[in-house]
Amino acid sequence: MKNFRIVIFAELVSFALAIISPVAAFGAEHSMPRTLLVFGDSLSAAYGIGEADGWVNLLAEKLATGTTSYTVTNASVSGETSTGGLARLPAALEEFQPAIVILELGGNDGLRGLPLGVLKDNLTAMIKMCLAAHAEVLLAGIQLPPNYGPRYTEPFYALFGEIAEDMKLAFVPFLIDGIPQQPDLMQEDGIHPKAEAQFMILDNVWPILAPMLRTSSD
């Protein structure tokens, strides 16, 4: 009789573990950090400053102290155009499988005076790639220096908003808003913000990004 009870007890334990294990595995899977991919140019690649001082690293530090569970991956490349980004994006999506993509490209297209139609097509194609990969997209816009002339700068700036509206995207109209108006916060080239201005970039992004984030229990 004693041996019979031991066998029955062992079978009950095995049955309980069989039920609990899938639940535990499910919970472990869903507690895995999601990837937030920043896919941009020199404004996100910490050009001219230490990588640790860049706004993307500041974002990673902010997320690490919150209730969300995200790993921030910075795939930004200084000098990148939208054409170069379009070529790189498929591999980045496959490698990192992001839940969110912050798409910050187009500034170098504008600085080179490239056709706006090409920029629109490239951005649209990249956004569709991200959505097809089940990633939400936050689009970051940019303004050009006024010396490029309003005939180009105004439709260039408007293009980002038009794409965001048409594709119903989260949108930051001007990534470095509030910084170029303070020359002492800009590097000597007049294009890239200094290290001490990086928190202002994060302040521009955060109110738009925060509602997209899920907590670790979601």
Image (cartoon, helix red, strand yellow):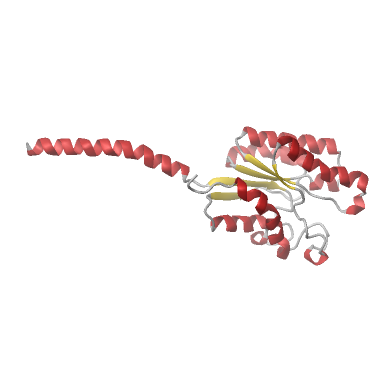
How many labels sit on residues? 0
Front residue of 22/37: it is 22
Side of 72 relative to 175 (left or right): left
For image coordinates 78% across by 65% down, the residue present is 185
Is residue 82 visible in the rendered structure shown here? yes
- Which quarter of the rendering shows the N terminus? top left
Relative to 197, is 148 above or below? above
Residue 217 percent coordinates (x, y): 47, 47
For image coordinates 61% across by 45% down, the residue present is 212
Front residue of 192/128: it is 128
Can you tell which quarter of the image residue 82 is in? top right
Residue 177 percent coordinates (x, y): 77, 56
Relative to 94, is 196 above or below? below
View extreme (bottom): residue: 184
Can you tell which quarter of the image residue 106 is in? top right
Residue 42 percent coordinates (x, y): 74, 52
Is residue 113 visible in the rendered structure shown here? no
Residue 176 percent coordinates (x, y): 76, 55
Side of 29 relative to 78 (left or right): left
View extreme (left): residue: 1
